[in-house]
Image (tube, rainbow, N blue to C red):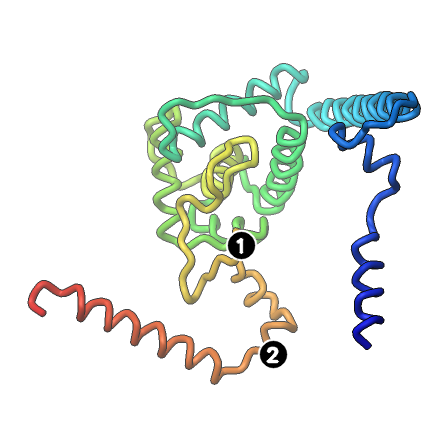
């Protein structure tokens, strides 16, 4: 049995890429005098460059096609994207903002913006929706912020706007701005949910709101053991009391 385990271990250690491919990415190991390694390395670089260039051109064409639904031309859409990201970064507390244009980040913003616009059109009435319908609109978009976060974000976006008149009707641009403020796009490079905190009723797990699974009745939620949950809550309360007890200045 010991000899077999040694053989299996040796077989596992040998599992890996082909020797030529491995040596192509390990220049310190290429000591052979023949020129086949240099040719393979050059071929790999050329193939990777050609494929990456083709993928970037395809992505650029796809992004430009998507941008036609958001503005008169591609330059106007890019400028609108940069201005929104700059506002989001400033609201997040960044003093020195810098917006780098990445096609993948721009495409993610275009896809989300298009989805938010479609959801807004379902509830739109006279080019706007009532302020009281914002939680329902957020729920349609797959987000579940609390009412306090919605109110604070509404005041924040309203303060940055040009119009100083307070209105109970929310326009499409303001509603979409509120969503991107609470849930920043990838191009903003700020931590997601910077204005939201994970709570017992609305937990955030790995940057994703778990409340939507509670609302949708996901099957995995039904498998939870209430005794395990009770022990977790009791342990958390006990740790909190102990922390308060030992950090109190009177003790």
In the image, residue 93 lies at what x, y percent?
A: 36, 33
Q: Residue at x 69, y 27 (%)?
A: 69
As drawn, the label of residue 223 is 2
Please say whether residue 100 is visible from this viewpoint: yes
**Quarter placement of the C terminus:** bottom left
Give the side of residue 33 with respect to residue 89, left or right: right
Residue at image mark 1 = 206
Give the side of residue 249 with respect to residue 35, left or right: left
Q: Nearer the viewer, mark 2 or mark 1?
A: 1
In the image, residue 219 lies at what x, y percent?
A: 65, 73
Secondary structure state at the residue bearing disc 2: loop
From mark 2 to mark 1, how far is it between C-alphas? Answer: 20 Å
In the image, residue 143 lies at what x, y percent?
A: 53, 52
Secondary structure state at the residue bearing disc 1: loop
**In the displayed structure, would residue 219 be above or below residue 64?**
below
Q: Nearer the viewer, residue 98 or 44?
A: 44
């Amino acid at each position: 049995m010991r000899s077999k385990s040694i053989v299996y271990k040796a077989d596992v250690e040998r599992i890996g890429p082909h020797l030529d491919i491995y040596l192509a990415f390990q220049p310190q190991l290429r000591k052979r005098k023949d020129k086949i390694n240099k040719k393979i390395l050059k071929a790999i670089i050329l193939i990777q460059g050609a494929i990456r260039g083709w993928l970037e051109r395809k992505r650029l064409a796809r992004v430009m096609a998507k941008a036609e639904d958001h503005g008169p031309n591609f330059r106007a859409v890019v400028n609108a994207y940069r201005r929104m990201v700059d506002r989001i970064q400033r609201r997040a507390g960044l003093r020195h903002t810098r917006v780098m244009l990445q096609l993948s980040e721009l495409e993610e913003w275009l896809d989300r913006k298009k989805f938010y616009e479609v959801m807004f059109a379902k509830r739109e009435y006279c080019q706007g929706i009532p302020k009281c319908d914002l939680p329902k609109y957020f729920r349609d978009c797959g987000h579940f912020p609390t009412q306090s976060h919605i109110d604070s974000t509404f005041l924040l976006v309203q303060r940055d706007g040009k119009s100083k008149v307070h209105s109970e009707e929310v326009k499409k641009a303001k509603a979409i701005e509120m969503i991107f403020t609470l849930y920043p796009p990838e191009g903003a490079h700020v931590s997601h949910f910077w204005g939201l905190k994970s709570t017992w009723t609305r937990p955030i797990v790995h940057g994703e709101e778990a409340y939507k699974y509670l609302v949708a009745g996901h099957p995995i939620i039904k498998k939870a053991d209430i005794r395990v949950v009770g022990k977790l809550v009791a342990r958390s309360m006990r740790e909190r009391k102990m922390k308060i007890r030992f950090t109190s200045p009177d003790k």
